[in-house]
Image (cartoon, helix red, strand yellow):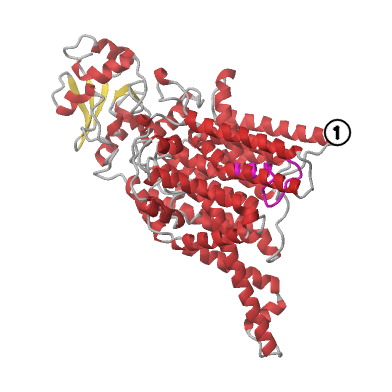
Amino acid sequence: MTWWQTIPTFASAALIYFLPGLSILAAAGVRRLNLVALAVPVSTSVAACAAVVVPFLHLPYTPLVYFSISGVLALLTFAAARLWRKKGKHIGHLASNGPLPADPGPWTAKLAVPLGAVLAAVLIGARFITGFGGPDNFSQTFDNVYHLNAVHHIAQTHNGSSLTLGNLTAESSYFYPAGMHDMMALLQMLTGSSVPTAVNVGTIVIGAVVWPLGAMFLVSRLAGNRPVALLAAAALSAGFSAFPYLLVGYGVLYPNNAAIALLPVALGLAVEALRMSKGAPSSFVPPVLAFCAVLPGMVLTHPSAMVALLGFLVPVFLGRLLEVFLAWRAGGSAARPVVWWAAICALYGAGVVAAWLVLRPGLGAAPWLPFQSNARAIGEILGSAPMGTTTAWMMAILTVIGLYVIARTLARTWWMLGMFLVAALLYMVVSSWPPGTFRTLLTGVWYNDSFRLAALLPVVTLPIAVFGAEWAIWRIRALLERVAKFTKARRKSSEGATLWSRSLAVDPAGMMGAVVWVSILLLALLAQGGTLAQIQGRISSIFSITESSDLVDEDEMKILKQAKTLVPEDGVVLANPLTGGSLVYALADRQPVAPHIFGERSDNEQLLLDHWDEAVYNKDVCPVIREMNAYWALDFGSKTVIPTEDPFPGLADVIAGTAHGTEVLAESGNARLVRMTACG
C-alpha cells in the first residue's frame, strides 16, 4: 500500500477529527483561528464522552452514532445561543475571535493562519511519512501490542468506554483513557483500512495539524493575535524533536502524544479565563465554556496532560493574584477581590498538591532512573535537545532571545517564564536528580520517565521562541527600512534609487509583508536541523519490518497474514504478546487468549496460558480448548520485545518442538502457526 492510496483515509480523518467540533463551535459563534484550533479538542471530548455514555443507552459505538450525537449537540448549541440572544442577553465571545490586524500587510493578515498551518503540516507530515515508511508499518515497541489491539477491540466490539477498556479482557475491564483509541477506531470503522494505517494517519493528523493549530492558539493568548507571532508559532512548531516526534519514536506512547497535542488549547483557554491573555474576552463565560468543552477529551486521552496543565497554571494564578493586589494598592479597586483571589489561589494550590499525591503511581510502576547531570539537563532544555539529541541551534538561539525579551518586560510576562520553569524543573529533576521520594513526588505521575516529561517542554518553550522570532523579524524589518530611507535620501531621483527603495515607496505594506514571509520561511527551514533528522531516523528504525525487528519480524508477519485464512473467524489463538504474537488480533482479526502483556485472566484463559502444550497428557486442557475453540497457537520463538521471565509457559514445548498432538499449519523461517490435534 502506498501513501497516495491513503488519501481517502486522510479525508475521512478530517471528518472524524474536525467535523463535530467545527459544527458545535460554529453554532456557538466561534470563528477563525479559535474555530479551527478548538475543533479537534472538542471533537475528542465528544468522541470520548459519547463512548462512555452510549453503552448505558444500549447503542453501539460507531461513526454513525458519533456523528449523530455531534449533530444533536450542534443543534442544541445553536438553539441555546439563539434563545439567549432572543432574550436580549449576550454571553460574549472568545478573545481574538475577529480578523487579524493588517500590519504588516492585509494579505499577510488574511493568509497567516491558513498558510502557517499548511507550512507546519507539510514539514511535520513529511517527516512522519518518511519515518513510517509505509502506511501499514507499525511501531516495533512494547506498548504497541496494547494500542493496536485496543483500537481493533473498540472497532470490533463497538464499545470504546474508558470506564471498561482496561486490558482488553472481560476480567480486566477497568478504567483506561481511551480518547485517542476511540478516534482512531472510528477512523478504522469508517474507512475499513487496516489498524496500522488508521493509527498512522491519525498520528500524522495529530502531529501535523492539531499540534500546530494548538500552538498558534496558545501563542495568540500569550504573545498576541498578530500575524507574525502566529506565523512564527506555526513554523517553529515543526522544529522540536521532543514533540510531536519523541513519543512516537519511543514507547510507543500514543495517548500521551495525543493528549499533549491538545494541551496548548486547554492552557490558552485557561489563561484567557483567568484574564491573563494578551487579548481579553468580552466576558469570562466564553473561555470557561470552551475550557469545559475541551477538558474531558484531554483527560480521557491521558490524565497526565491534566496534571501538567495544573502545574503550568500555578504561575498564572499567582500572576492574577499579583495583578489584583497591585490594582488594590494603586487605589483602583476594593480589597475584596484580593481576598477572593488569595483564597482561590490557596484552594488551587491544595488541589495541585492533591493531584500530585493521588495520581502518581507507586515506585514499582515508575522504574526509570536518571541518566545525566543537572548541568547537562539545563543545556538540553535551553537547546531544545532533551534525551541526548543534537542541539537545535535555531530553536536555542530563538529561546535565548525570547528569554531576553521576557526579561525586558518581566513585570508583565514573569508568569510566562514561570510556566517554562515548571516544565524545565520537572525535566531536570526526572533526568538528573537521584531516585527517591522527592523525585517520585514531582515526576511519578509520568512514571519517572524522562521521555514523557521531555515531550512537555515544547508546549512552554514555543511561546518563548516565538518572542525571540518576532524580535528578530522586527529588527530585520527596521534595518531594511533604515537602509531604504538612507538610500532614498542619498538618491533623490527615482532612476537612481535602489530596487528596494523604489518598491518600498510604491508598496511599503507589500514589501514589509515579503520580509515577514521570507523570514518565516528561513526560520522554518533553519529549524529543521540535525536534531530532527536524528529523531526521524529513530522513528524509521522502529517502524521498519525487517528480519530482525524487535516485535514482529518479516517471517512472523507472513505467518500473521496466513492466520487470517487458516484460523476460522471464531477461532481463538494462543500467543505470547511479548513476542508480538498477540497482534494476530489487530493484524489478522483473530482473537488471542492474551490480547495484552498485562491483565487479569479468567481461570480458563490462565489454564491455557500455562498448560496449552500439555493437552496430550493433562486432562484439564482439552475441555477448555474445545470450550474456547482455542486450537491454534503461534510459535514466534523465545525472543521478546523486552527482556523478561516467561509469563506464558503454555507455549514452552511448542517453541522447543516437543509438544505432542500438534500439527504445523504454516511456517516461515522460525515462525510457525500450529494446531492442537490431540483434542479433536
User: Circle 1 is placed at which residue position?
Assistant: 87
Answer yes or no: is residue 195 visible.
no
Q: Quadrant of residue 568?
A: top left
Q: In this view, does 656 lie to the left or right of 319?
A: left
**468 is higher (above) or lower (below) than 628:** below
Q: Residue 308 at x, y = what percent?
A: 52, 40
Task: Specify the amino acid type for callout 1.
Answer: Lys
Magenta extent: 265-284
Q: Does the magenta stretch include residue 170?
A: no
**20 is higher (above) or lower (below) than 60:** below
Residue at 66% across / 58% down in the picture? 226
Quadrant, the C terminus: top left
Q: What element carries label 1?
A: loop
Q: Residue 128 at x, y = what percent?
A: 43, 50
Q: Is residue 9 left or right of residue 379?
A: right
Residue at 38% across / 44% down in the picture? 433
In-front residue for pair 356/621: 356
Answer yes or no: is residue 59 visible.
yes
In-front residue for pair 96/435: 435
Q: Residue 365 at x, y = what percent?
A: 37, 31
In-front residue for pair 554/50: 50
